[in-house]
Image: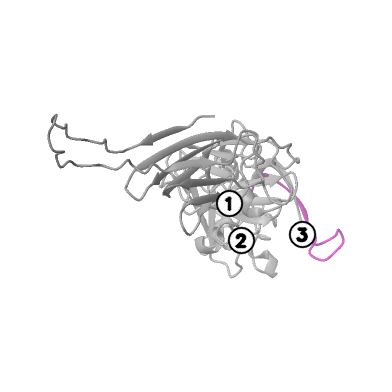
Amino acid sequence: MKRRTFVAASATSLLPLAACAEPQQGTFTPAPIVPVVSMDAVDDHDPAQPFNLSVVDGILEEVNVTSDRSKTIEGEFAEDLTTWTSSGVLDAGSVHTVVAKAVSSDGTVTEFEQTFSTQRREGSGFAVADVTPIVEGETVGIGAPIIVFFTEDAPDRAEVEKNLKVESEHGHEGAWHWISDSQVIYRTKEYWQPYQKVTFTANFEGVFLGGDVWGDENHESVMEIGRAQESHADLETHTMTVKFDGEVEKEIPISGGSGEEWEYYTATGVHLVMEKFADKTMVSPGRQEGDEGYYSTDVKWATRINASGEFVHGAPWNGSLGSANLSHGCLNASDSDAEWFYGIAQRGDPVDVSGSPREMPWDNGWGFWIMSWEDWKSGSALEA
């Protein structure tokens, strides 16, 4: 524990008196009024309990409290400014530094600095269970979200979200959106800038997360953003244009959903590449073998772009590539074009589809870019 006190005061000055003479008229400077600051927190302080700062012979002008986890502790001044009381729960097993300034009625200033430690708390088991699409060695697209699953339901979404951090090498604006108490997703306002690293951190160890839950352990994941690959599938011109870093790389003749049934329309809006398969069996959704409209078709070079079964894939049987929409909702291409797209596709690459009356719901797969930025931000526990 350490304490430093600095006092500014004026010295007393008296004029000398001559022997056997009348006293001369002199000046007198009173002693300074020195504010005395004290704190009731000591080492091994209970992190669930507040602590107080007080001053005698003065008022508190400034109080700043930080933990060794780079957190600022909030608090409130009394109406007469002679005391300050912390609010909220402190980090457990942490060293806190208190810096304050007090001033007296004659302007004398006392600067106060002191540290104290808090008791440790055993973690309840609440931690990060999985982060998608972050896999070591993988490069993802500029639309990639950060999807976080927890080991259990968050006791307090706001307390958990306060301890989540996303940093990128080139800077960005982003926000969290809660899907459930055990899942939260991060999306940027604009696409990530390409060719950079993005670091996600959950600082949970020794942190109060609401209820009677304390964080278990910290987590860090690094996501590598690759080349900017954006595709636009125009169902009216039957062409998918693929751009690399803003320049057209390839135009692919396609055939979209026929619309014979509502579910056979390809959904419009921004899709994201989610996964890909060299070989895939396509089965009619919601139908059993023997039902009218049932199909089971083996395809090659299938790149998934939503959760309800839309893929870019090879369809050598489709003679209307580039001229008509005849599929069950997927984007049909030649085997060679589908293989090329499969080869370059990164999870998180945007595929924007236009020209269909069927709009894709934002929660169909990774359709998070369907939602407006304001609506996305409203899903943050810290925006409420």
Task: Name the residue at 85% across, 60% down.
Answer: 288
Which of labels 2 and 1 is toward the front?
A: 1
The local secondary structure at tag 3 comes to loop
The local secondary structure at tag 1 comes to loop
Query: Closer to the N terminus: mark 3 or mark 1?
Result: 1
Residue at the right extreme, as displayed? 290
Residue 362 - label: 2
Residue 81 located left or right of residue 22: right
Which x, y percent locates residue 236? Answer: 52, 65
Quarter of the image for residue 137 reads: top right
Q: Nearer the viewer, residue 28 or 357?
A: 28
Residue 285 - label: 3
Q: Is residue 249 visible?
A: no
Q: Quadrant of the C terminus?
A: bottom right
Label 1 sits on what residue type?
Ser
Residue 287: in magenta span: yes
Please say if 99 is above or below 314. Answer: above
Q: Quadrant of the N terminus?
A: top right
Residue 26 located left or right of residue 326: left
In whole angstroms, how far apart are the C-alphas of marks 2 and 3? 20 Å
Label 2 sits on what residue type?
Trp
In whole angstroms, how far apart are the C-alphas of marks 2 and 1? 38 Å
In whole angstroms, how far apart are the C-alphas of marks 3 and 1? 54 Å
Query: Closer to the N terminus: mark 2 or mark 1?
Result: 1
Label 3 sits on what residue type?
Pro
Query: Closer to the N terminus: mark 2 or mark 3?
Result: 3
Quarter of the image for residue 308 reads: bottom right
Residue range highlighted in magenta: 284-304
Rate crowding at label 1 as few (under 14), some (14 to 19) or many (20 or more) other CA atoms within 10 Å. Answer: some
Which x, y percent locates residue 319? Answer: 61, 56
Q: Nearer the viewer, residue 347 or 153?
A: 153
Residue 87 - label: 1
